[in-house]
Image (cartoon, rainbow, N blue to C red):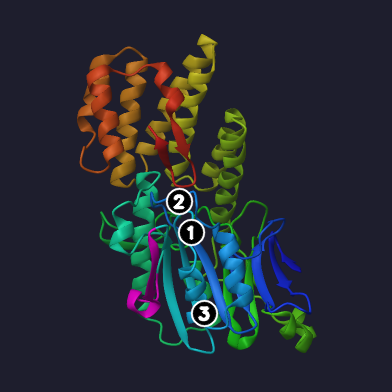
Amino acid sequence: MMAAGISTVEYLHPSSDSEKQTYTSITTLGGPFGALTTHNESGITLTLHQLLVDQVSLKGRPILSLTEEISSRARTIDEALAILRANRTSSTWRLILTSLEENRSVNVDLSPLGVFVTPLEKLGNAVTNTAINPAMQKDEFALDFSFYADTRYRHMVLGTRLKNFSAATVQDAIDLISSHESFDVYQKSWKDKSPRNTIGKRSNVQSLVLAPSDGLVYVAVPPMPFARPLEGSYIPLPISSKEWRANPDYLSLPSLKRRKAFNRDFVEANAYFRKAVIPLTEEGRFEEGIRLIEEAAKLQPDEAAYPLTAAWTEFLVYWRSEDPKVRDEALERAYEFLNRAEDLELENYHENLIWLFKARYFDLKNDREAAKKYLFRVKRDISKQLAEAADRQEKFGYSRSQLRSMVIDYLNVDLHQF
């Protein structure tokens, strides 16, 4: 096993009397399972992705058991597909299978309903986290609007940029998956600024480039604690123990970075924000989380995500506290953060979220007329959840007790529950 930051490259060897193959797993330090991203001795590469589709079977086989069997036993794409077709999964997943020897890649969407295979070239060699087959699309869901929109815009960005690739190098691949370029659907223009709707997500945990023809895997290492790996260096490691034995000087190989260097303040701001998510979501330490978000905002003052998520958090402080003075102060800080966010460049959806929460502020202040003015501004044709929340408040008003149902998705800058 070799570690690169919190990522690890594990070389798994079967016992001498086993029919299983040796395979390499790229996973996370301390992870109990090996078969998330793998490459076996027959040249079969497997990567696992999650799909949000409401299709579940209590009798299905766990996905990591299946991916381990494919990694250790499949010698061709067809053998891998045969293993999948002989089993039912318990939930919905996506596998990308590539065979170096066969020069073949397929996208496999898995569901208790079946196995749906599409040659990757028919998909423009680009997929994200959306269902492709109609049998799965009908039950697809999203935890919030931003996740739904983000994965589709990322696919558009990825597909557009891949059209310019004929024979991509490792450096080209690193530039692509570390990209912060996004398409602003409202301004109809390309941007290289915000970690929304981009290939490189704010929630990035691991990035890697497999280069089996070179015998290497390039694993990204974050440049500082809590920063995203894609912002750092891609360290070359042997793709198999066989390669490691054949090339013990791999440590002398140069690491690679994105050609267009990341702005230091941008990287550090994202690190502060990612660090804030831990006390905010796991432990409810709201004051500590807000302080970290404000540190991020100092470094990147034009990013609306920081004051907007700070405002939502102050609403939770208002709900949790039994001290009237603490509640009043939290509510005023929330309104101040909303004003700061509104003054920055916003997507249409987030602008409407600000208006909804300004309406909530005024209802909590018992100013019903001011609340109705903001509710009138909220558009009802963007998000079903947003429309329902605005209609419900318009009809019944809004009270402190309703805040207990609010669930913030910090990394996607959205709400799971309004």
Q: Residues within 10 Å of mark 3 (few under 14, many from 20)?
A: few
Q: Which residue is painted at 79% across and 84% down in the image? A: 248
Q: Which residue is painted at 26% across and 32% down in the image? A: 388
The quarter of the rendered structure image containing the C terminus is top left
Residue bearing mark 3: 79
In the rendered image, residue 254, in percent from the top left (x then y), is placed at: 69, 79
Q: Residues within 10 Å of mark 2 (few under 14, many from 20)?
A: some
- Contact between labelled residues 3 and 1, with CB atoms less than 8 Å apart: no
Earlier residue among tags 2 and 3: 2
Report the amino acid beneath label 3.
Answer: Glu
Report the amino acid beneath label 1.
Answer: Thr
Q: For this view, does 150 lie left or right of residue 90?
A: left
In the rendered image, residue 46, in percent from the top left (x then y), is placed at: 54, 72
Q: For this view, does 186 lie left or right of residue 213?
A: left
Earlier residue among tags 1 and 3: 3
Query: Does 119 lie within the magenta span?
Result: yes
Local secondary structure at mark 3: helix
- Contact between labelled residues 2 and 1, with CB atoms less than 8 Å apart: yes
Residue bearing mark 1: 89
Query: Does 63 lie within the magenta span?
Result: no
Q: Quadrant of residue 321?
A: top right
In the rendered image, residue 160, in percent from the top left (x then y), is placed at: 34, 72
Q: CA distance from mark 1 to mark 2?
A: 7 Å
**Nearer to the camera, 299 or 410:** 410
Q: What segment carries the magenta color? A: 113-126
Q: Quadrant of residue 159?
A: bottom left
Local secondary structure at mark 1: loop
Earlier residue among tags 1 and 2: 2
Query: Residue 29, relative to residue 95: is it above or below?
Result: above
Residue bearing mark 2: 57
Local secondary structure at mark 2: loop
Report the amino acid beneath label 2.
Answer: Ser
